[in-house]
């Protein structure tokens, strides 16, 4: 097999009761270690692609492979962070982050606590483990949810519009933060957004859903070194890529 971390091969899916598919014979792949943003207008089928990867939905036809193996033969092959943070309000921040470790099993309380403290420290929430999610800001909750996603131990992470509910300035900080996390964690990230600027900032490659039903994704490489800053986005070739993407998506959506 190739170095693909995730591969869709001719995947089709129609929601029950719909008369046309949302996903139509879609093939694409992600390489190991890539940071890829999947962009497209609201309602075009982005989250459906994630639901197919995490087996909340089953394709009508086609195959999905993670690390070269059919997902139907695997358990625990991806970490998923849904669109809203979905921290359980009755659990503390630490016990929320602990959940994937409890599910995985085989770790003592002391080992779990060490891992959680380290994870909270890494996402800038050291010492806040005993707080309840409602005591944290939106950005902090998203970092806690990301720490929980990392605790799955999976190399493939699916992040569904994690910053869309945050205010603009928090979003700017969070995307820089996430980019740094990715640089020092050995992960492959597929990140959904409808924000073209966010996609260009984060991605090594953008996959644009520019036809509906989604039968292909247009791959656009983003040629800029990491770490990136806001100034990176102002470079002429980056502005050009962003404007091309916006035009492409607008045309298909109108
Ligand atoms: P996106 O994440 O790109 O905003 P979704 O993947 O959530 O879009 O949804 C794609 C399309 O499928 C939308 O038009 C939506 O109305 C439809 N859809 C989503 N969930 C269901 C469902 N459970 N039953 C029927 N249609 C659905
Ligand atoms: Mg969605």
Image (spheres, rainbow, N blue to C red):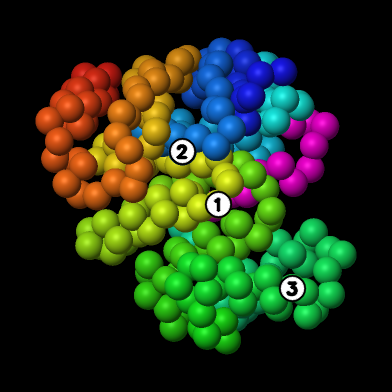
Residue 97: percent from left, percent from top: 62, 69
Residue 223: percent from left, percent from top: 31, 29
Residue under circle 1? 185
Residue under circle 2? 35
Q: Secondary structure at mark 2?
A: strand
Mark 1 CB near ligand 2 (8 Å cut): no
**Crowd class of label 2 (few under 14; some 14 to 19; many from 20; radius 10 Å):** many
Q: Secondary structure at mark 3?
A: helix
- Would you say 4 lies left or right of 126 here? right
Mark 3 CB near ligand 2 (8 Å cut): no
Question: Which picture quadrant has residue 4?
Answer: top right
Q: Is residue 63 visible?
A: yes
Question: Which picture quadrant has residue 213?
Answer: top left
- Would you say 245 lies left or right of 221 here? left
- The residue segment tinted magenta is 71-83
Residue under circle 3? 112
Mark with earlier residue (2, 3): 2
- 1 or 2: mark nearer the eye: 1
Q: Which quadrant of the figure contains the C terminus?
A: top left
Q: Is residue 56 visible?
A: no
State how far apart marks 1 and 2 are (Cα). Answer: 11 Å
């Amino acid at each position: 097999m190739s170095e693909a971390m995730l591969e869709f091969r001719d995947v089709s899916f129609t929601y029950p009761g719909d008369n046309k598919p949302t996903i139509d014979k879609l093939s694409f792949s992600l390489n190991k270690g890539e940071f890829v943003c999947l962009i497209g207008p609201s309602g075009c089928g982005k989250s459906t692609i994630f639901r197919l990867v995490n087996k909340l939905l089953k394709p009508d036809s086609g195959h999905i492979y993670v690390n070269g193996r059919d997902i139907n033969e695997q358990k625990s092959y991806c970490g998923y962070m849904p669109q809203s943070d979905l921290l359980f309000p009755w659990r503390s921040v630490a016990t929320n982050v602990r959940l994937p470790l409890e599910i995985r099993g085989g770790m003592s309380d002391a080992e779990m606590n060490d891992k959680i403290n380290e994870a909270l420290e890494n996402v800038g929430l050291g010492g806040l483990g005993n707080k309840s999610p409602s005591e944290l800001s939106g950005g902090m909750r998203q970092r806690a949810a990301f720490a929980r996603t990392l605790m799955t131990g999976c190399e493939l992470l699916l992040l569904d519009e994690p910053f869309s509910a945050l205010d603009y300035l928090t979003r700017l900080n969070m995307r820089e933060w996430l980019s740094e996390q990715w640089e020092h964690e050995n992960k492959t990230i597929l990140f959904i957004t409808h924000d073209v600027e966010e996609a260009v900032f984060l991605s090594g490659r953008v996959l644009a859903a520019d036809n509906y039903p989604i039968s292909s994704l247009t791959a656009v490489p983003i040629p800029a070194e990491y770490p990136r800053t806001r100034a990176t986005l102002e470079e002429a070739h980056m502005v050009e890529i962003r404007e091309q993407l916006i035009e492409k998506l607008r045309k298909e959506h109108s």
